[in-house]
Image (spheres, rainbow, N blue to C red):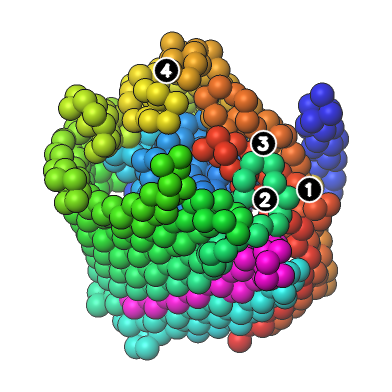
Amino acid sequence: MKHAKKIKLSLIVSIILGNNIYAKDISILDIVTVTAQKQKQNSQKIATSITVFDEFEIEDKNIEKISDFISYVPNFMSFQTLGLNGVLNPSLRGISSIGQSAMVSVPIIIDGIPMSSAMGYDMSLLDIDKIEVLRGPQGTLYGAGAEAGAINITTKKPTNEIKAKVATSFGSDNKRQYSFHASGAIVKNKVYIGLAGKYYEKDGYIENLNSGEMVNNKENKYGKINFRWTPTENLDISFITTKFKRDDGSNNLNILYAPKEVTNNLEGYNKVDVLSHSLKIEYNFDNYNFESITTKRDYDMIFQNDFDFSNVTKMHQKKSSYTDSLAQEFRVSKKDDTFTWLLGIYGDDEDSGFHTIQDKLTGAGLIHVNAIQDLTSKTLGIFAHSTYYVNQKIALVTGIRYDKVDKTLKEKANNIDIKDSFSEISPKFSLKYKINKDVMTFFTIAKGFNPGGFNPHATHSDKKSFGSEKLISYEVGLKSSLFDNKITLNSTIYFIDISSLQTVHYINMSNFYMSNAAKGTSKGFEVELQAKATNEISLFTNFGYNDITFGNFSDIKGDYSGNVKPYAPKYNFSIGAQYRDASGYYARGDMTGYGKMYTDNKNIYERKAYELVNVKIGYEKNNFDIYLYGKNIFDTNYDTHGFSNKFTVYSDPREIGVQLAYRF
């Protein structure tokens, strides 16, 4: 009840603040152009639920990695798989992938580089131009796996203008962060270069009582170089290379309900090395646009952890994994006043695998496991997307895509060699109606799917593979820019019918396999409001409500029919205000919150409802900024209990710090 009262209070505050927005000297909200649908469009005029963060919001909200902006998006949540930094599984409108699959239902595309795995999902961000979060199935344009949504991220393009910035942050737990970015022209109007880098270090908060030291320290290094060449007015070529290294300590977890202390007899670590390349060629002629995007990404991780968290060897694990992917996409499109269309073809080739070394104490003694698995995946996607303007008020948006995913899994030690193919046609249809120049409504039906995978150790041959998860989404949305663009108010109502739901199915109390034994439905609504109260004051509030439950579903452990799907909070919200004046003074405060979330099919284990408060005050001038900031200033505990039915994943404690930046 107390959380419901807080939500009601937050909404009342936003309404009260909203009633004061008619004061004199009011400025307007910026018009945001997005490329999430692979063409430049006004975010308020596309028939898609979308939340956008531009470069100013990214800086104001202290967005430094993927998980930093998720709580500002309605019905979006993420949880840290196995308590590993960087390994994140997103849940959007209650839809998330099972942890055992290592896939995600909301892929990230950054400068054209696709990432559809939980491994490395919570990446570091720097020099970002725009973050676009699309809600609802996006398979038509983004392909297999984008069943719940997609995140499109673009970094800043170097131009003729010479820009440079250095910044540093110091905060709680001995946090140190140093960053820079610089860009400009090598040959004016022809050749440009951009450079960026960041170093981050922070002490942990889980103490090893044996050594007296913190075990989950963090250290990240990030670098990027962007070459851009515009040999003619119509041709734009960019080549971007990024490098990221992580050198952290143990996982951020412990045995169920344990305090933040361990007696480990094995030193844990989490080391990650990621190298990415993106080559984009864009050519414009008349109203046509041609794009070629070639990407290469190599991801390597090795972690070691004492999963019994004691000075007795009961469960020690060392695991290395890799993912090497090469992708190519070609697109051609045309825009005019009546008919806009886009055609594309996509292909990728991905090799991944892992090597697990494990010592586990059982009734039969200490069992040693040494397992190696290799997985290859090849994807082909062909797609089309169009908008036909029937008249000045009505537009039809259609899309269709065919995807074929071929997978092979090999495990030499057990002579396992499994192959399977997953193909699907993903259509989308939207009807868009322009009520007037400021208000638009839309209705969308779209299909989404997540490819299947393998159960290599299943005893029955027909259980060696599990099928694709499929869903049909129905949503009605309203977008409005009111009072001469001083307010934007967007809302959506949706219903999602999920068939062939991918779940963990137990055949006895200790053995399981992944299957499509369950079905489910997800329904809810979302509201986003932004307003300019005066030239200096900006206000915002977002709210999402979601109800996702299993249909008929049971296994040896119980009957889950009607239960809430794990990792799907009932609601989330954010509300805040920001002050920035011409003399340089700045202040900001916001609150974000989530409802209760279950972590198991039985709905026994949970993360309780919580709210976090963040603040930031400072002084800004033409060439320097200084801020004092606080994240989770009341040090709220929001630990997640019951991961894998036996672990608690710890939440981040309060962080207080200072930020300094200087621009050249």
By secondary structure, the bulk of the magenta-drawn segment is best described as strand
Residue 127 at what x, y percent from top left?
51, 70
The secondary structure type at the circle numbered 2 is loop
Q: Marks 4 and 1, Cα distance to the nearest angstrom? A: 36 Å
Q: Is residue 513 above or below residue 407?
A: above
Which quarter of the rendered picture does the C terminus lie within?
A: bottom right
Using a 10 Å C-alpha cutoff, classify the residue at mark 3 as few (fewer than 14 neighbours), some (14 to 19) or many (20 or more). Answer: many
Q: Which mark is residue 555?
A: 4
Q: Give the residue pinned by disc 1.
A: 636
Q: Which residues are magenta?
A: 200-228
The disc, 3 or 1, on the residue closer to the chain's N-terminal end is: 3
Q: CA distance from mark 3 to mark 2?
A: 10 Å
Quadrant in which residue 424 is drawn: top left
1 on left or right of 378:
right
Residue beneath disc 2: 651
User: Which one is earlier in the sequence, the residue at label 4 or at label 3?
Assistant: 4
Q: Amino acid at mark 3?
A: Arg
* Sequence-wise first label, 4 or 1: 4
